[in-house]
Image (spheres, grey):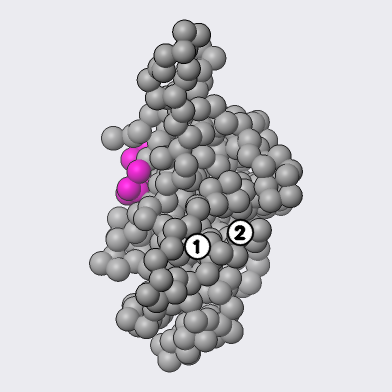
């Protein structure tokens, strides 16, 4: 507990009032036997990237146990071998969870700066830059899952979830929604953009509607695709989970889940106790997004 607290303090990214909560979260995860044996050593470094990753895994573990979701105790972690972070058992099916908490690469510095006491200032939200990070770590994890499949670590009939926590991309989130008003994890996998108002031929305005957006540009002007769950190469991913939380006070965390309409091994609906859940389908050439429940 002391080593965990010291590592969190060294990182200087966490308010003092809930340092003990975070240390308890990490300590409980380590005591469970599901965490990496290197957890304390990594947190003790004070490296924010390692701490965010450990916290994200600890939050997912607590969420799964609170919702009585069966977890397999993976020998890969204890032995230090490669493999996904969690294996769940739902309805007799194994579902792997590969978690990641991206760091703020190519995010504007002014967005990441702490607010100055006594100074009122407005900041533009770097929606595209943050979305690019979500998309790129999703792509990285898709490639990792492909390697696990090739090596037989993940079997062809297993479901796979990529879980992304964007808490390291800024401190000003009210929720995990992007410019579309939908969770950013939905924006990272489906070509859904901001709300737009169409102008009719006679100059009048039509009702607001969701705009089609298959890509965004990163800070270097490169095109980054956002229609990933409509690509066959992503069919190995059954669903994706998104969050922006740095803590789990009151044992609650807001999680958004989007099912892959092309997923080879779909996971059961309403089986993970998430806050928001979406399914998607192609109907007569149109993309239809449904909120589950």
Which residue is nearer to you in this view: 27 or 207? 207
| Closer-to-camera residue (197/173) | 197
Mark 2 and mark 1: Cα distance apart in space = 9 Å
Q: Residue at x 58, y 46 (%)?
A: 128
Q: Is residue 257 left or right of residue 189?
A: left
SS of the residue under disc 1: loop
| Crowding at mark 2 (Cα within 10 Å: few <14, some 14-19, many 20+) | many
The crowd level at tag 1 (other Cα within 10 Å; few <14, some 14-19, many 20+) is many
Residue shown at 30%/55% (left/top)? 67
Q: Is residue 95 left or right of residue 220?
A: left
- Tell me if residue 169 is in the magenta stretch: no
- Screen quadrant of the C terminus: top left
For residue 170, the mark is 1
Does residue 24 appear in this view? no
Mark linked to residue 107: 2
Tell me if label 2 and label 1 are in contact, CB under 8 Å.
yes
Q: Quadrant of residue 75?
A: bottom right
What stretch of residues is rendered in magenta? 268-276
Question: Where residue 48 sits: x, y (%)?
Answer: 56, 74
Q: Which mark is residue 4?
A: none
Q: Quadrant of residue 101?
A: bottom right
Q: Vertically, is 85 above or below 11?
A: above
* Left or right: 218, with 290 as reference point: right
Q: Main secondary structure of the magenta part?
A: loop
The residue sitting at 42% across, 40% down in the picture is 182
Q: Earlier in the sequence, mark 2 or mark 1?
A: 2
């Amino acid at each position: 507990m002391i080593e965990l607290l010291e590592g969190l303090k060294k990182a200087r990214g966490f308010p003092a009032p809930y340092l003990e909560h975070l240390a308890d979260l990490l300590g409980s995860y380590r005591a469970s036997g599901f965490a990496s044996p290197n957890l304390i050593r990594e947190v003790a470094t004070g490296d924010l990237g390692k701490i965010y990753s450990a916290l994200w895994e600890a939050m997912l573990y607590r969420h799964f146990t609170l919702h009585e979701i069966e977890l397999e105790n993976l020998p890969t972690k204890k032995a230090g071998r490669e493999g996904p972070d969690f294996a769940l058992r739902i309805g007799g099916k194994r579902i792997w969870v590969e978690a990641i908490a991206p760091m703020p690469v190519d995010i504007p510095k002014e967005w990441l700066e702490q607010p100055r006491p006594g100074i009122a200032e407005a900041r533009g939200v770097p929606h595209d830059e943050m979305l690019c990070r979500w998309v790129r770590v999703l792509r990285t994890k898709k490639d990792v899952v492909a390697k696990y499949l090739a090596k037989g670590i993940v079997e062809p009939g297993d479901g796979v979830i990529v879980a992304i926590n964007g808490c390291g991309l800024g401190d000003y989130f009210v929720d995990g929604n992007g410019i579309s008003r939908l969770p950013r994890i939905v924006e990272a996998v489906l070509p859904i953009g901001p709300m737009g108002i169409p102008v009719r031929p006679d100059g009048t305005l039509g009702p607001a509607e969701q705009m089609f957006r298959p890509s965004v540009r990163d800070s270097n002007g490169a095109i980054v695709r956002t229609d990933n769950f409509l690509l066959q190469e992503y069919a190995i991913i059954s669903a994706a989970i998104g969050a922006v939380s740095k803590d789990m006070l009151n044992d609650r965390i807001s999680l958004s889940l989007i099912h892959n309409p092309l997923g080879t091994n779909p996971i059961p609906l309403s089986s993970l106790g998430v806050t928001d859940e979406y399914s998607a389908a192609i109907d007569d050439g149109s993309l239809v997004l449904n909120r589950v429940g």
